[in-house]
Image: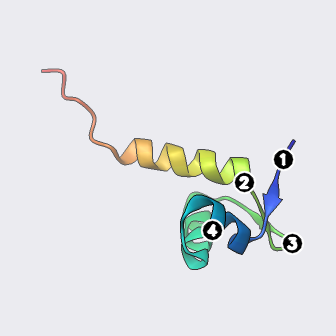
Amino acid sequence: MAMHLTPTELARESGLERREVITKCVELGVPIFQGRIDKSLFQESLREHVTAREPQPSGV
């Protein structure tokens, strides 16, 4: 079941500021539809973004 939250509600749950939530949605392409954001999509997109930015082991 999808959970659609306002930026304020999502900020409260994720420990971010409201403005940061909106900025991340724009950066990551997470839609804000009728003032609501899909919580699961936001969290997964944020997790992928953080994982992609971590340095990869060189393996040499």
Q: Secondary structure at mark 1?
A: loop
Looking at the image, is mark 2 or mark 3 nearer the viewer?
A: 2
Q: Tell which residue pokes out farthest to the bottom in this image.
A: 19
In the image, residue 11 lies at what x, y percent? 63, 68
In the image, residue 9 lies at what x, y percent? 72, 68
Q: Residue 34: give its label.
A: 3
Q: Which residue is mark 1?
A: 2
**Earlier-in-chain disc, 3 versus 1:** 1
| CA separation in Å, label 1 and label 2 | 7 Å
**Earlier-in-chain disc, 2 versus 4:** 4
- Image quadrant holding the C terminus, namely top left
Looking at the image, is mark 3 or mark 4 nearer the viewer?
A: 4
Query: Looking at numbered disc 1 in the image, what kind of residue is underneath it?
Result: Ala
Horizontally, is 30 left or right of 38 in the view?
left
Here the colouring is rainbow
In the image, residue 34 lies at what x, y percent? 86, 72
Query: Looking at numbered disc 3 in the image, what kind of residue is underneath it?
Result: Gln
Mark 3 residue crowding within 10 angstroms, few (<14) / some (14–19) / many (20+): few
Q: Residue 11: give its label.
A: 4
Q: Is residue 7 above or below residue 51?
A: below
| Residue positioned 18% across, 21% down in the render | 59
Q: Which residue is mark 2?
A: 39
Q: Are marks 2 and 4 in contact (CB under 8 Å)?
A: no
| Residue positioned 54% across, 64% down in the render | 15
Query: Looking at numbered disc 2 in the image, what kind of residue is underneath it?
Result: Lys
Q: Secondary structure at mark 3?
A: loop
Q: Secondary structure at mark 2?
A: helix
| Residue positioned 67% across, 58% down in the render | 30
Looking at the image, is mark 3 or mark 1 nearer the viewer?
A: 1
Looking at the image, is mark 2 or mark 4 nearer the viewer?
A: 4
Q: Tell which residue pokes out farthest to the top in this image.
A: 60
**Earlier-in-chain disc, 2 versus 3:** 3
